[in-house]
Amino acid sequence: MKQGFHYAFGFLPSRRLLLLVAAVSMTTSPYQHMMPIFAGEVFGGDSRTLGLLISGAGAGALAGTAYLAGRTSLRGLSRIIVGASFSAGIGLMLFSQSRLLWLSLVLMLPIGFGLIVTATSTNTILQTVADEDKRGRIVAIYGMCFLGAAPIGNFIAGSVASRIGAPHTLLLLGALCTLAATAFALRLASWRAAIRPVYRRLGVVK
């Protein structure tokens, strides 16, 4: 475990990817647990309204999966991660302020798209560039960052929502997700410089 963590967080590209996916998961995953509040109190609906909202995010995730399935190379994937994380954060912020059901359903699409594309693209890069004897540990640490961060985010979101309400909580979480995406984007050049030798060795770039 010590070797795995040292390998994962000692290499700049993997460290930044893991921190980004943890931040995106922690800030966007709570939307699922907030949906009953939006369906019942914000939109005055019922279980059908809740189903529509969750389906909107699911449709976005399905679109993201289909988009990534059509890609054949790692080239350009870092830009996609940046765009997807921005999509999740900004989509969450806009959704939190919407009071029109049809508009909220549309805004669920970029949230689902951004979350699944960020997670899947990060996992793809991490597994591809990892050394053979470290890949299993990298996948485990990735799972810890992505899946493990979500319950923490849910706990924090629930505590905050009890004080400022669900809409303002999602607005705050969306802003934090966007901030994490901005931090990654601003240092993208150094990330690419650090990972280029590995990409060159793997034949991704010349």
Image: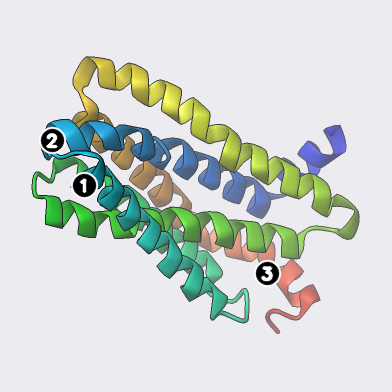
Q: Residues within 10 Å of mark 3 (few under 14, many from 20)?
A: some
Q: How many marks?
A: 3
Residue bearing mark 2: 42
Q: Which mark is residue 12?
A: none
> SS at mark 3?
helix
> In the visual, does 148 lie left or right of 46?
right
Q: Earlier in the sequence, mark 1 or mark 2?
A: 2
Q: In front of the other: label 1 or label 2?
A: 2
What type is the residue that disc 2 sits on?
Val
Residue 151 image point, x, y percent = 51, 29
Of marks 3 and 1, the one in the foreground: 1
Mark pair 3, 1: CA separation: 37 Å
Q: Classify residue 176 by image quadrant.
A: top left
Colouring used for the render: rainbow
Q: Which mark is residue 196?
A: 3
Q: Nearer the viewer, residue 195 or 77?
A: 77
Question: Observer-nearest residue: 73 or 187?
Answer: 73
Q: Pick out the residue farthest to the right.
A: 133
Which amino acid, mark 1? Phe
Q: Residue furthest bottom?
A: 206
Q: Nearer the viewer, residue 20 or 13?
A: 20
